[in-house]
């Protein structure tokens, strides 16, 4: 150990004497790529800095390992011996040097976070993020650089370094994924994920609910990656310097055994959250391919759900074991549910007997052992698990399963989502009859729900489904329960909710709907775009389901006009009506435009938007009012 | 007593034979390995230090017993360079650590021995060619080796530095076996006890220097000739040197049958090398 430390000391001395300027590189890069001018999250997410750090680390270790060959003392050192210790110490010295560089990066981030008065958790997560993506990636890059130096001594080595650096770095990921998509090779995407050590998304790898993408699984992935590469490195060294056969054969055997985790890597990244833009594109493709030809239709069930008792495990994807108490409304031996297609049903049973079922897309068709008569009651046990839709998530760090997403089986046959103007939207699958819920949620954090008080055991009744939301979510209660992520000032949130509710109630009154209150409002990063493409130029931020308000982003109340609130209110009401949603796009557009125009005029509100108002406004307003409210 | 026995060593690079059935016995003092470029000297050196695999046997004997792996070998490769970014002392200390030497005094002693004390705080990259070779010898001396293997120690050095290196190696020859590979015969002339001459991977002659010189007694002569006759002599004899004197030439001839009017000269190691290597015919 003493020898190792002494050799490391001299190797580090040599690296520092030639590469000290590299320590300043991250600071320069932050300025060069303007990362420093944005918030600490942008600073942390900087893919440019990481990409250069990866290539830089590779070059540092490449040169460090190649210098004995270039300077001509490789053979001398081979004769002297102790190459194992020497190579390991050199590798370690490089790691220490890169640690130094990463300490500078961490220092900048922490100081910058403090100067910007960022919340403690963001700084804390930033540090973990930098350790995962910057530091571990640097160490991995060192091993790659050292391995390439051991393999290739000519100038082609540098070209290979840059190529490999780009392939495994954050900036090359987009290129690789595009190529994989063009070639229509899905498995290649898995491979790209497996070998990539950069951020999944360099633009939006942060979410105020989720935090950063730093699940423990990613650390494990990088750990296996590093271990495997170390094996590759020592294997190359062993093969290159064939001496002391027995010792080396032992090493080779060990290396091969340790290489086995590589097989596992390719499987891993599927179970991690992908929130950003690249992720959204992938999400879009994932659901687009499935829903592009589907029309929203609804086949009514021959039963109603009266009670749901379930254990919901959200700690790694979603796993549900549920008892669904149903009451038969028409004689039948078939039970049809709608459940988002990526939740795979594992088991359906009734009275201790397994039932046969067929899961096709979003539909589950269960065959009962005998005909059930109207009024019969029964309890179906259904077990399912899987990743949620890409737009929603449940996992180690956060849960976003709002009631407007079909994560619980919905009675009847329809689809969880639909396409409109190339946008994926969730179907408004609200049961509209009171259901008693008893749900035990297994989650790393406190779950916020529309039912019950703030515990992870949810007991209560709702006609509008269940929302399970957790993560970096704060809570305050006065006129209603507010759940919010850190970027929203409480006063603005309350003002927004009150004003929106005022208009919602106006719309409800106008449509003859019973006025509802907002009992809980979630201000979290929900997906937008509910009315965005209805031939209007306004992106709607909110959705109201029963007594719960979901608002997608920061409501800048200083910029919101009354007309904005009218749009929001109309959207909140209309989008939770399946009768409206099921109309064709042209009809919906005319109805919304006419109704908003009607309401703007009725409230004597100043018009800002230049929407195409249909000629026969009165006719479309009547159509609106005739919808099943 | 340490002895190296090289038995039937053959080394091939693909189809090319670099060493063919080499048999050499090396015991004490300075041993010279002579040969032109490409003769196989460096290959033999690399085989000796274990850098290359070969056919045959190389045995390091101590008092008649095979002690392979127990013998300490110091090695100075042909194009020597060492940790450029470190100072002379640091580089030496690093090598000492690699060689598992704890004593710090040993490094200072060796630096002093090779006369690098004044340069010990200089970075290796700033050393002159001669200093660098001395550092090379110094690093080879760390760990008190039984055998010192030195490849082309004086290439590219000025005469003063050459003499310094030669004297150093000569002194070291009293303490250990010093094997010097060179194509510069002058380097070995005064210091080598034994030599082997390699030609195209084959040992063409080896033995005690005195014995080899004896073998050439009466076979080395000098002769004054006209300039126009040089070509004729070159085609018939091995000529080791040509000196211009006014309009005529004085040549040194090495041959089993000297011209009648030549003056017999005392043979030198260079003559031995030329005689067995046949340089003038190359």
Image (tube, grey):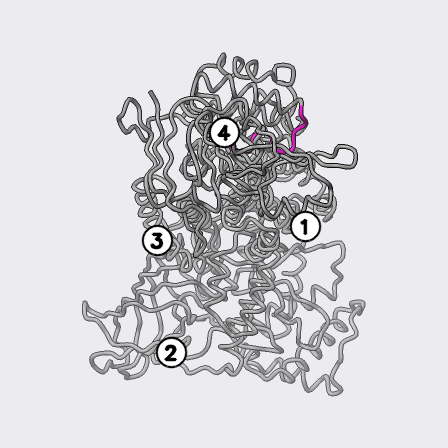
For the question of whether residue A122 can be seen, the reply is no
Letter of the chain that mark 4 sits on in the rendering: B
Question: Residue at point 45% right, 57% down?
Answer: A269
Marks 2/4: CA–CA distance: 105 Å
Residue at disc 3, secondary structure = loop
Q: Residue at x 71, y 79 (%)?
A: A594
- Answer left or right for A130 relative to B211: right
Compared across the picture, whether B227 is left or right of A194 comes to right
At x 42% / y 50%, what residue is drawn?
B12
Whether residues under marks 4 and 3 lie with C-beta atoms below 8 angstroms apart, the answer is: no
Question: Is B41 located above or below residue A510 in the figure?
Answer: above
Cα separation, mark 3 vs mark 2, equals: 36 Å
Q: Nearer the viewer, mark 2 or mark 4?
A: 4
Q: Say which of marks 4 and 1 sits in front.
A: 4
Q: Which mark is residue A360?
A: 2
Check disc 1 and report the residue beneath it: A492
> The numbered mark 3 sits on a residue in which chain?
A
Contact flag, marks 4 and 1 (Cβ < 8 Å): no
The range drawn in magenta is B149-159
Q: Nearer the viewer, mark 3 or mark 2?
A: 3
Please tell me which residue lies in front, A602 or B35. B35
Position above or below: B93 against A546 = above
Q: Are marks 1 and 3 in contact (CB under 8 Å)?
A: no
Which numbered mark, 1 or 2, is in the foreground of this view? 2
Checking the image for residue B217, the label placed there is: 4
Q: CA distance from mark 4 to mark 1?
A: 112 Å
Which mark is nearer the camera, 1 or 3? Answer: 3
Give the Cα distance between marks 1 and 3: 54 Å
Q: Residue A435: x, y in percent?
A: 38, 65
The residue to which callout 3 is attached is: A260
Q: Are marks 1 and 3 on the same chain?
A: yes
């Amino acid at each position: 150990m003493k020898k190792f430390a002494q050799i490391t000391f001299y190797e580090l001395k040599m690296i520092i004497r030639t590469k000290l300027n590299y320590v300043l590189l991250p600071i320069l890069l932050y300025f060069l790529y303007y990362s420093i001018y944005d918030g600490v999250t942008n600073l942390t997410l900087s893919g440019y800095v990481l990409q250069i750090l990866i290539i830089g680390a590779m070059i540092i270790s490449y040169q460090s390992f190649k210098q004995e060959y270039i300077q001509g003392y490789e053979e001398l050192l081979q004769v002297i011996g102790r190459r194992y210790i020497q190579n390991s110490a050199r590798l370690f010295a490089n790691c220490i040097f890169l640690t130094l560089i990463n300490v500078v990066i961490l220092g900048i981030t922490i100081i910058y976070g403090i100067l910007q008065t960022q919340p403690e958790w963001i700084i804390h997560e930033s540090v973990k993020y930098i350790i995962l993506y910057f530091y571990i990636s640097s160490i991995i890059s060192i091993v790659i650089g050292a391995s390439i130096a051991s393999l290739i001594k000519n100038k082609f080595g540098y070209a290979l370094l840059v190529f490999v650096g780009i392939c495994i770095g954050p900036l090359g990921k987009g290129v690789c994924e595009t190529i994989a998509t063009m070639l229509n090779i899905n498995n290649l995407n898995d491979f790209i994920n497996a070998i990539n050590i950069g951020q999944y998304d360099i633009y939006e790898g942060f979410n105020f609910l989720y935090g950063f993408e730093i699940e423990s699984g990613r650390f494990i992935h990088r750990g296996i990656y590093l271990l495997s590469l170390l094996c590759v490195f020592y294997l190359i060294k062993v093969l290159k310097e064939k001496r002391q056969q027995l010792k080396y054969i032992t090493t080779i055997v060990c290396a091969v055994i340790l290489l086995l985790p590589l097989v596992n890597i390719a499987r891993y990244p599927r179970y991690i959250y992908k929130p950003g833009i690249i992720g959204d594109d992938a999400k879009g493709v994932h659901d687009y391919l499935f829903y592009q030809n589907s029309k929203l239709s609804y086949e009514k069930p021959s039963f109603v759900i009266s009670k749901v008792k379930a254990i919901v495990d959200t700690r790694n994807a979603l796993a549900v074991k549920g008892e669904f108490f149903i009451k038969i409304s028409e004689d039948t031996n078939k039970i049809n549910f709608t459940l988002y297609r990526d939740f795979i049903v594992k088991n359906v049973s009734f009275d201790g007997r397994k039932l046969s079922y067929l899961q096709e897309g979003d539909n589950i068709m269960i065959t009962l052992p005998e005909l059930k008569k109207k009024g019969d009651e029964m309890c179906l046990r259904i077990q399912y698990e899987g990743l949620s839709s890409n737009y929603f998530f449940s996992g180690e760090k956060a849960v976003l399963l709002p009631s407007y997403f079909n994560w619980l089986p919905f009675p009847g046959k329809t689809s969880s989502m639909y396409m409109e103007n190339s946008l994926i939207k969730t179907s408004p699958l609200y049961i509209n009859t009171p259901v008693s819920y008893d749900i035990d949620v297994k989650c790393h954090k406190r779950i916020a729900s529309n039912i019950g008080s703030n515990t992870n055991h949810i007991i209560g009744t709702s006609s509008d489904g269940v929302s399970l939301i957790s993560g970096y979510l704060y809570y305050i209660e006065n006129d209603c329960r507010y759940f919010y992520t850190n970027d929203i000032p409480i006063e603005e949130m309350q003002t927004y909710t009150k004003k929106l509710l005022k208009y919602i109630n106006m719309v409800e009154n106008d449509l003859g709907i019973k006025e509802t209150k907002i009992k809980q409002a979630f201000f979290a990063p929900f997906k937008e775009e509910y009315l965005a493409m209805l031939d209007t130029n306004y992106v709607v931020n909110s959705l109201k389901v029963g007594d719960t308000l979901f608002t997608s982003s920061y409501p800048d109340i200083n910029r919101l006009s009354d007309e904005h609130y009218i749009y929001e209110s109309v959207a909140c009401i209309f989008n939770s009506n399946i009768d409206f949603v099921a109309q064709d796009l042209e009809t919906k557009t005319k109805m919304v435009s006419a109704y908003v125009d009607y309401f703007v005029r009725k409230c004597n509100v100043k018009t800002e938007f230049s929407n195409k108002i249909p000629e026969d406004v009165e006719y479309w307003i009547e159509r609106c009012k005739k919808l099943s409210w | 007593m340490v002895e190296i026995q090289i038995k039937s060593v053959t080394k091939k690079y693909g189809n090319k034979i670099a060493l063919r059935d080499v048999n050499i016995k090396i015991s004490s003092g300075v041993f010279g390995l002579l040969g032109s470029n490409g003769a196989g000297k460096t290959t033999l050196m690399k085989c000796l230090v274990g850098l290359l695999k070969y056919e045959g046997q190389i045995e390091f004997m101590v008092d008649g017993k095979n002690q392979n792996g127990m013998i300490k070998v110091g090695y100075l490769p042909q194009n020597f360079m060492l940790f450029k970014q470190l100072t002379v002392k640091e580089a030496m200390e690093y090598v000492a650590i690699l060689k598992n030497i704890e004593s710090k005094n040993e490094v200072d002693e060796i630096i002093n021995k090779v006369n690098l004390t004044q340069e010990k705080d200089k970075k290796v990259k700033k050393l002159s060619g001669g200093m660098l070779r001395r550092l090379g010898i110094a690093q080879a001396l760390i760990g008190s080796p039984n055998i010192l293997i030195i490849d082309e120690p004086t290439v590219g050095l000025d005469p003063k530095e050459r003499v310094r290196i030669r004297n150093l190696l000569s002194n070291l020859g009293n303490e250990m076996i010093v094997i010097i590979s060179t194509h510069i015969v002058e380097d070995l002339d005064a210091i080598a006890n034994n030599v082997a001459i390699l030609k195209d991977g084959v040992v063409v002659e080896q033995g005690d220097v005195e014995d080899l010189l004896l073998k050439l007694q009466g076979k080395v002569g000098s002769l004054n000739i006209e300039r126009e006759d040089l070509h004729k002599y070159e085609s018939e004899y091995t000529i080791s040197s040509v000196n211009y004197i006014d309009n005529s030439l004085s040549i040194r001839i090495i041959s089993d049958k000297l011209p009648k009017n030549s003056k017999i000269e005392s043979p030198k190691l260079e003559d031995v090398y030329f005689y067995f290597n046949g340089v003038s015919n190359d």
